[in-house]
Amino acid sequence: MSEHQYTPKSKFGKWFNDRLPLLTLANHLTDYPTPKNLNYWWTFGGILTFCLITQIVTGLVLAMHYIAHADMAFDSVEHIMRDVNYGWLIRYIHANGASMFFLAVYIHIFRSLFYGSYKAPREIIWIIGIIIYLLMMAAAFMGYVLPWGQMSFWGATVITNLFSAIPLVGEGIVTWLWGGYSVDNPTLTRFFTLHYLIPFLILGLVVLHIWALHVPGNNNPVGIDIQKPSKDTVPFHPYIVIKDGFALLMFMIVFAFFVFYTPNILGHADNYIEANPLVTPAHIVPEWYLLPFYAILRSVPDKLLGVIAMLSAIFILAALPWLDTSKIRSAVFRPLYRQFYWILVADVLILGYVGAMPAEGLYLLIARVATAYYFLHFLVVLPILGFKEKTLPIPLSITEPILGGSPNLAAAKNKESLNIK
Amino acid sequence: MSEKKTDRRDFLFTATYAVGAVGVAATIWPMIDQMNPDASVKALASTEVDVSSVNPGKTITVLWRGKPVFIRRRTQDEIVEAKSVSLKDLKHPEKDEDRAKNPEWLVMLGVCTHLGCVPLDQKGDYNGWFCPCHGSHYDISGRIRKGPAPTNMEIPKYEFVNANTIKIG
């Protein structure tokens, strides 16, 4: 929290703040010293907060009209689309909002990967972020089940059946999850309850995520530790607020494009057919944001190992702060890591593409190579790179490369006495 | 604090924790067990099906416990084919005789053992069933031959009540 003691100006403010220091908190958030070189990749935290609030508000409104019953869910969604005032708008915002949420979270995650934001002392921020990401996937999956269309039903069947891969207790767990012998009404009602609950869990974790962030402060594109407050920082308000606000507006243009011009492009036509337990759609595909993991699942020919590989692909991220052995955070000063980073980005995009294709022939081969590389990146490349890579000299402060000439180490060392204050 | 030997108070603490833990567990269990199949779901445990209108070479699909059950009246060729497969070629070795007590009738859960999709009839490389989700091929006895599914399609408990009626469950 703030180094200096904050005293509210008004008498009432002081009286209130002595009893509940909300104004101190507000002051901390306003004055919070932020690195002055944050680029637009840093605006996605604010954008994600906007996405979460949007999903909660539109979700609450939808829940006023939706009926969580196997016989009525499908019709109630059509009722929202056709009869409820602005129901079409609210549902399209909610459905596309999920995709926008994941778009923003992937940019946010890959920003951390590029600038090494997960490294000490920010491991806890990173791990909380991974938990939020897991909860987002759970919420998105359960939300997709609620309209009770064909993709809802069969997506739910396939995903819950993943647990049947667990030896001995697997079948029992699946029956327990379903509340029956197949996905049916008991499954729908519990998914609705959990879908309602999870966003509030995420909200709580977001508070912890930001709290943990405010202890060491933001990482920055140069990736060095900075003095706070100093000439390397600016107050959060108004500088970052304005920058975040502008980025949010740009993001909302993309969001609105999907909502108003192609509201169904990210969904599946099959989900406008009511759930039928006797017919499986010819081609079951999860939503786009789960495709890379789906590709990993399908690339392993064994059921249990496939499930393990898919879950490991997510959980390996939590171990990233310890797998990456490099002391340098930002990829700007890591010429080799920078190349491997872009290979990883391409690898994940390829996994996403083959995840949407049938699991056969060349696609299967590509999926297997890409899966192997994904794990290779985290388990082999990153640990070795930290020891082998010859990194570039890092500047001593954010302002030094601009005001103090070249970021050359020898030159920088000479200026050391001048710059540190 | 110096080293102390266990006294009466330590015993009371331990006993209190133990009783508390049992109490918490006993309270949590109903919260967990309520998610298991309820009495109304379990009550739908058996279904009777009239199969008199099923001709040889045809499959009907009936719903049992929310899941599809395939009832196929197999032709003579199909029976011969199912019986002629060597157990060595099977991923999950089961004799056809053990899967179809009456070889003319194959009654099995129409649920792929990979991730629970409904396989398509008369498709795939083995003239049996093919699961469109992740590409598992089953033969005319419902045995897994190729693809990610680990086991053969399950045979539910069933019996012929009379020549034309099968009771599943």
Image (tube, rainbow, N blue to C red):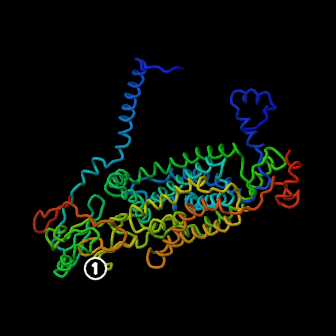
Residue B24 location, quadrant: top left
Q: Residue A328 versus residue B123: which sits nearer the camera?
A: A328
Q: Amino acid at mark 1?
A: Asn
Q: Which residue is mark 1?
A: B127
Question: Can you say which quadrant of the picture contains the C terminus of chain B?
Answer: bottom left
State whether residue A207 is above or below residue A318: above
Q: Position of residue A310 (x, y in %)?
A: 47, 61
Residue, far top: B8
Instruction: Residue A305 in the image: state x and y as whole percent.
Output: 41, 62
> Which is more toward the observer, A106 or A68?
A106
Question: Position of A155 compared to B59: left or right?
Answer: right
Residue at the image point whose x is 29% and y is 67% from the top: B110
From what the image shows, is residue A214 above or below residue A180?
Answer: above
Task: Name the quadrant containing residue A182.
Answer: bottom left
Q: Residue at x 65, y 59 (%)?
A: A387
Q: How many marks?
A: 1
Chain under disc 1 = B
Q: Quadrant of residue B81?
A: bottom left
Provide the secondary structure element on which disc 1 rests: strand
The residue positioned farthest toward the left in the image shown: B162
Crowd rating for badge 1 (residues with CA inside 10 Å; few <14, some 14–19, many 20+): some
Q: Is residue A100 visible?
A: no
Q: Position of residue A322 (x, y in %)?
A: 59, 53
Drawn side of residue B161 relative to residue A353, left or right: left
